[in-house]
């Protein structure tokens, strides 16, 4: 599908996105989320996870620039002039579709670039390709560092093929935000931990969560703050909690989560952090959050736990040490009890459904064993949460999926829906937690230590 090249900045245009060839299943999802965030209508005309080039129709050049301005996985966006299977046919299409644009561009400083996929060119070969565009009446000076117009030829090759199977030609409109992951690189960060999420994936998660100025974003498994730092980088107000208060506070006299916000000049975007877990949360069950983002614990190094005790009677009496209530002392570590992995997933959805505004987003990561995962069956569901997209990061024998949900309007379908309850020992009293092993409560953990053998 192609449309005429417009003369006005406000007319629809056909564009080409040059994606980074990484995190392929996240790329289209990120652009779709940014389209929702900015209210831009996007019509995809060509996309494949196997290619770095995708084509789409956008309302205007201005909307095109806005769309990719904070995209982590976009290298560049082009106004597409032509697509063809061979170089001669590409030139014919350019002459037919774009000659009315040439006078407006002819006198400006310009440069030519060439992008290839599955191939490379010598400098001499690149010059020869550029010279084939000599029919363009470009009278302005060549400017390699500060051009007004950048013309780009983009070629796609099959592996080891001598000639390209598809060629695109266009004018560069804008770059993405590929620099942001370097800015927020964990290696440069003041405070990190063993589970801190990679900066690029944190920023992509924040994009899928529609983090923006005026939005309130919460992470119930905040750890060292990777997701809330990323959301604050896009202007959101953020806060988080963690079952381990040492993660929020940091070491005595050492850095903590707040120091990461200080480092990046984002203190105004950090509301606060507190000690809590999802099943014992002080967060009001009313709908005021714009997004919930998290990477819940996988329970591999130690079994999943929540605040509380296996012994239902333990902790009912206050403990005093040196005249001060024990739970108010800085070194206090609250007791914890085992927690089911399946229950955690259900509780995340129920927690979010009760607190997200209409259209608010839940983005959380879920680990899965590759051999056992069944698409469409093993994705957790909730009647008030609509699954928007599933993005997959594959490792050797396991993967982790970024699940993105949108809160449906209203409360229809919530009657009788309750959070997932813990299983109990056979014959145990009603409400008593089951004294199960970590592996029994977390099938992923069991599979991990078994080497992900098929069931």
Image: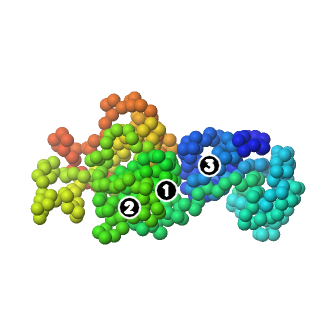
Give x and y (percent) for residue 378. 42, 44
Q: 76 or 9, which is in the foreground? A: 9
Residue placed under numbered mark 2 in the picture:
258
Query: In this image, 73 relative to 4: left or right?
Result: left
Q: Residue at x 84, y 46 (%)?
A: 100
Query: In this image, 314 relative to 225: left or right?
Result: left
Give x and y (percent) for residue 34. 56, 46
Q: Secondary structure at mark 1?
A: helix
Give x and y (percent) for residue 88. 85, 53
Crowding at label 1, few (<14), some or many (≥20) Cα neighbours within 10 Å? many
Q: Residue at x 47, y 46 (%)?
A: 214
Q: Secondary structure at mark 3?
A: helix
Quadrant of the drawing holding the N terminus: top right
Distance Cα–Cα, label 3 vs label 2: 30 Å
Q: Secondary structure at mark 2?
A: helix
Residue placed under numbered mark 3 in the picture:
66
In the displayed image of the protein, which residue is found farthest to the front? 268
- In the image, which disc is placed on residue 233? 1
Query: In this image, 288 relative to 322: left or right?
Result: right
Give x and y (percent) for residue 422. 26, 44
Q: Quadrant of residue 428?
A: top left
């Amino acid at each position: 599908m192609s449309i005429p090249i417009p003369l006005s900045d406000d007319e629809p245009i056909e564009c080409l996105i040059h994606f980074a060839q990484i995190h392929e299943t996240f790329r289209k999802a990120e652009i779709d989320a940014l389209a929702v965030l900015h209210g831009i209508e996007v019509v995809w005309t060509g996309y494949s996870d196997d290619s770095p080039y995708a084509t789409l129709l956008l309302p205007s050049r201005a909307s095109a620039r806005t769309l990719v301005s904070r995209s982590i996985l976009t290298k560049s966006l082009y106004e597409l002039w032509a697509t063809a299977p061979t170089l001669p046919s590409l030139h014919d299409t350019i002459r037919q579709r774009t000659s009315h644009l040439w006078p407006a561009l002819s006198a400006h400083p310009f440069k030519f670039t060439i992008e290839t996929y599955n191939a490379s060119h010598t400098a001499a070969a690149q010059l020869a390709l550029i010279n084939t565009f000599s029919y363009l009446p470009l009278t302005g000076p060549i400017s390699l560092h500060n051009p007004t117009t950048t013309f780009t030829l983009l070629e796609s090759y099959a592996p080891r093929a001598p000639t390209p199977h598809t060629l695109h030609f266009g004018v560069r409109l804008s770059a993405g935000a590929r620099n942001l992951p370097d800015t927020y690189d964990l290696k440069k960060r003041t405070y990190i931990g063993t589970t801190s999420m990679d900066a690029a994936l944190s920023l992509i998660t924040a994009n899928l969560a529609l983090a923006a100025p005026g939005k309130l974003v919460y992470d119930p498994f905040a750890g060292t703050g990777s997701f809330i730092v990323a959301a604050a980088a896009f202007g959101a107000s953020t806060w988080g909690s963690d079952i381990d208060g040492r993660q929020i506070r940091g070491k005595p006299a050492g850095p903590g989560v707040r120091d990461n916000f200080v480092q990046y000049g984002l203190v105004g975007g950090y509301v606060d952090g507190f000690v809590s877990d999802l099943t014992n949360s002080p967060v009001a069950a009313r709908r005021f959050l714009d997004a919930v983002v998290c990477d819940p614990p996988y329970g591999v190094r130690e079994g999943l736990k929540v605040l509380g005790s296996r012994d239902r009677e333990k902790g009912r009496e206050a403990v005093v040490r040196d005249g001060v209530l024990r739970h108010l002392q800085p070194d206090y570590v609250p007791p914890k009890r085992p927690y089911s992995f399946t229950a955690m997933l259900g509780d995340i959805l129920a927690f979010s459904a009760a607190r997200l505004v209409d259209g608010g987003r839940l983005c959380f990561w879920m680990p899965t064993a590759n051999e056992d995962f069944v698409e469409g069956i093993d994705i957790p569901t909730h009647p008030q949460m609509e699954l928007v997209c599933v993005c997959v990061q594959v490792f050797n024998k396991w993967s982790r999926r970024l699940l993105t949900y949108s809160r449906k309007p209203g409360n229809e379908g919530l009657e009788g829906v309750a959070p997932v309850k813990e299983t109990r020992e056979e014959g145990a009293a009603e409400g008593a937690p089951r004294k199960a092993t970590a592996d029994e409560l977390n099938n992923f953990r069991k599979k991990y230590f078994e080497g992900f053998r098929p069931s």
